[in-house]
Image (cartoon, rainbow, N blue to C red):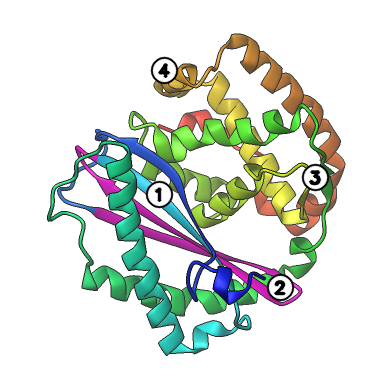
């Protein structure tokens, strides 16, 4: 836990832009600024880490997602302190708006002067969302604790780790967040329908996969299952018709046929190693997660 003097504020430790996409999407059918909010928890020995994600979609100008990581100096029932929750959410929301403007300016995206401003209705929405959803998430964490703690497998800093983790997220970023030729909101709904995984859970797994560390990266039972599901989705995206929509963006990032062949080969080998774990955890405790789905029929 960082000392208070080293924290960015009382309420959060780190701010990270997740993605910025200048321009507009054909799937945006609104004017002005659309604001979305996601959050999730991670609990380790009663130490509470909260991930907040603010996503701003501004047609004709830019889309941006910002992540706030907070190691709260509160117990897991912090949501019962209404004054604390309200003050925290207002501060983080206001800073997210400022961050949106700053990142856009740094990337030469000129936003209209009056488009980015606090929205009282949205402020109330995110406060109520935190108060209403936090108890259920904490309860779910308690119920699922055996599957949340410990590592089923660990990936050392080997040459294929980035292929198995970061490349998977590179592909999925395009269909869930970045590529404006895809229907990203629809695809997020398909993600939840097919896996039971909320978008905030996806963002937590994404953060783990993109973690920069010289040591091992460990995956709990539930994180292992989520990763395996996401890798299945990514492999189908590469070999399905939806790939045509993201091909140019992937090629711009250095993607080619040789890289695709290498990725699918590594993925097949890795999947074989994980099947014993999946049979143990999925077959009994998570029957709704099998069999895997035909993603290419539903993503768009």
Q: Which residue is mark 3?
A: 215
Q: CA distance from mark 4 to mark 3?
A: 34 Å
**Res 107 quadrant in image:** top left
The kind of secondary structure the magenta stretch mainly shows is strand
Q: Is residue 54 magenta?
A: yes
Q: CA distance from mark 3 to mark 1?
A: 28 Å
Q: Name above or below for residue 190 compared with residue 132.
A: above
Res. 156 image quadrant: top right
Mark 1, residue position: 65
Mark 3 or mark 2, earlier in chain: 2
* Residue toward you, 28 or 276: 28
Q: Which residues are magenta?
A: 34-61
Q: Secondary structure at mark 3?
A: loop
Q: Alpha carbon of mark 2 to alpha carbon of mark 4: how far?
A: 43 Å
Closest to the camera, between mark 3 and mark 2, is 3
| Any part of residue 279 in sight | no
Using the image, tell me which numbered label, if any, was put on residue 143.
2
Q: Which residue is at 48% across, 30% downward?
A: 297
- Mark 4 lies on residue: 248
Secondary structure of residue under mark 2: helix
At x 22% / y 52%, what residue is drawn? 33
- Residue 276 lies, in percent from the top left, at 87, 42
Instruction: Specify which label sits upstream in the sequence, 2 or 1.
Output: 1
Q: Residues within 10 Å of mark 4 (few under 14, many from 20)?
A: few
Circle nearer the viewer, 2 or 4: 4
């Amino acid at each position: 836990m960082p000392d208070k003097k080293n924290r960015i504020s009382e309420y959060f430790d780190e701010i990270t832009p997740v993605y910025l996409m200048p321009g507009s999407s054909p799937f945006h059918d609104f004017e002005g600024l659309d604001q979305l909010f996601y959050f999730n928890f991670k609990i380790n020995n009663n130490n509470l880490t909260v991930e907040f994600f603010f996503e701003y979609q501004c047609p004709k100008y830019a889309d941006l997602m910002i992540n706030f990581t907070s190691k709260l100096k509160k117990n897991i029932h912090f949501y019962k302190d209404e004054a604390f929750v309200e003050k925290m959410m207002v501060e983080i929301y206001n800073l997210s708006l400022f961050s949106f403007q700053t990142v856009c300016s740094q990337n030469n995206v000129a936003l209209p002067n009056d488009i980015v401003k606090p929205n009282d209705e949205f402020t109330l929405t995110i406060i109520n969302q935190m108060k209403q959803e936090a108890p259920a998430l904490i309860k779910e964490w308690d119920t699922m604790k055996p599957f949340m703690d410990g590592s089923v497998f660990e990936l050392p800093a080997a040459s294929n780790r980035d292929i198995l983790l970061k490349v998977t997220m590179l592909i999925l970023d395009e269909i869930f967040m970045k590529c404006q030729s895809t229907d990203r909101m629809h695809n997020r709904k398909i993600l939840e329908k097919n896996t039971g995984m909320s978008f905030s859970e996806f963002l937590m797994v994404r953060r783990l996969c993109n973690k920069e560390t010289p040591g091992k990266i460990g995956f709990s039972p539930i994180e292992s299952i989520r990763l395996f599901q996401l890798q299945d989705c990514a492999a189908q995206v590469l070999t399905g018709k939806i790939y045509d929509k993201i091909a140019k963006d992937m090629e711009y990032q250095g993607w080619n046929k040789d890289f695709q062949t290498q990725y699918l080969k590594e993925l097949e080998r890795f999947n074989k190693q994980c099947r014993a774990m999946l049979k143990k955890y999925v077959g009994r405790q998570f029957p709704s997660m099998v069999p895997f789905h035909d993603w290419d029929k539903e993503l768009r």
